[in-house]
Amino acid sequence: MASSAFHQAVNSKWIKGGGGACNSIKGFQDFSTRSVVVRLQNNNPMCIKQTYISNVYKLCSIHKSNQLRALPIVFSLYNNAHVSQTTENESTLILIRHGESMWNEKNLFTGCVDVPLTTKGVEEAIEAGKRISNLPLDIIYMSALIRSQMTAMLALTEHRCLRVPIVIHKETEQARIWSQIYSDGTKKQSIPVVKAWQLNERMYGELQGLNKKETAEIYGKEQVHKWRRSYYVQPPNGESLEMCLGRAVSFFKDNIEPQLLRGRHVMVVAHANSLRSIIMYLDKLTPQEVINLELSTGVPMLYIYKDQNFIRRGSPIGSSEAGVYAYTESLALYRQKLDETPNEDPHA
């Protein structure tokens, strides 16, 4: 399938109508490379090429003497179209804070205490899955805590890729051997899921299990706010955000960023402070700016990774995803293929 740049150039009203205001070869070339994803109407490359050349000659301001100059542009755009369709030049990063936990509901400091989701948390995880159901996924990272794991698995039940999440076990050599998959076909229909303690919530020390409102009444709202939101201040015998960032961002750089660099699409399901740490790195926030960063439970955030830069796209607006797919050509193409072959994963 040729790329959208080529297809739009062939079928555009601008060319078929004689060139419009853009009456030069340069104008045609610029127009042809600015495009949106459009489905090919004919899959015969030679037929497409001939139609393309024919339409070039219809440009009202390209005289016979300039037709030879036009041909290299035609074949260059045609050939580049086929190169670009197989070159992965961007990848997606989805960040999700776990759904509401039982201690979130009770307004308790949770930290590294392993608490499951509430019914509302389960519903948030499922809704998050609907919101990311049309985004490509290759690998999942989650923390070692159950609320993160529940959220990840519930979200994946809504994904349209139809691939089975498989938790990778490398705790011991025996665990690695016993959990091996020996079918290449089955591997292709699976999504690896990696557990990492480095993505755990920040350890709140002696605040864990305490009621947040009651703690503020004892120590003062300002002190509790510093413990919860500041970058440098540690709660009693707990981690500061700076310390949490040290482990979470180091893991991200060493394990997740290389996956994105390879063109793989990644989802990370973690916690308020481990994700605040990662977002601080992605968005280049200062310690002062991160104080005001709040993350809601169960709301996915989308980043595009391109040319070793992270481009924040915010959160998918709703389960229809109509707005998200306008952002990049490759995401739109993936969504299109999903719609064409609903029983297959085009990225597998």
Image (tube, helix red, strand yellow):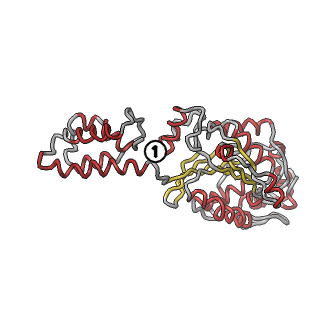
Left or right: residue 175 compared with residue 67 = right
Image location (x, y in percent) of residue 79: 35, 50
Indicate the quadrant containing the C terminus: top left, top right, bottom left or bottom right: top right
> In the image shown, does 95 or 3 lie closer to the viewer?
3
Q: Is residue 285 visible?
A: yes
Q: Which residue is mark 1?
A: 329
- Quadrant position of residue 216: bottom right
Left or right: residue 332 compared with residue 120 = left
Left or right: residue 244 compared with residue 218 = left
Residue, x 52% and y 61% (percent of image)?
308
Image location (x, y in percent) of residue 199: 73, 57
Residue at disc 1, secondary structure: helix
Indicate the quadrant containing the N terminus: top left, top right, bottom left or bottom right: top left
> In the image shown, does 186 or 216 lie closer to the viewer?
186
Residue, x 75% and y 54% (percent of image)?
195
- Quadrant position of residue 61: top left
Assess disc 1: are there few (<14), some (14-19) or many (≥20) residues with their C-alpha within 10 Å of its C-alpha.
some
Q: Is residue 299 visible?
A: no
Residue, x 41% and y 51% (percent of image)?
83
User: Relative to 193, does residue 340 appear above or below in the rendering?
Assistant: above
Amino acid found under the numbered disc labelled 1: Glu
User: Total number of numbered labels?
Assistant: 1
Image location (x, y in percent) of residue 116: 83, 44
Image location (x, y in percent) of residue 118: 81, 39
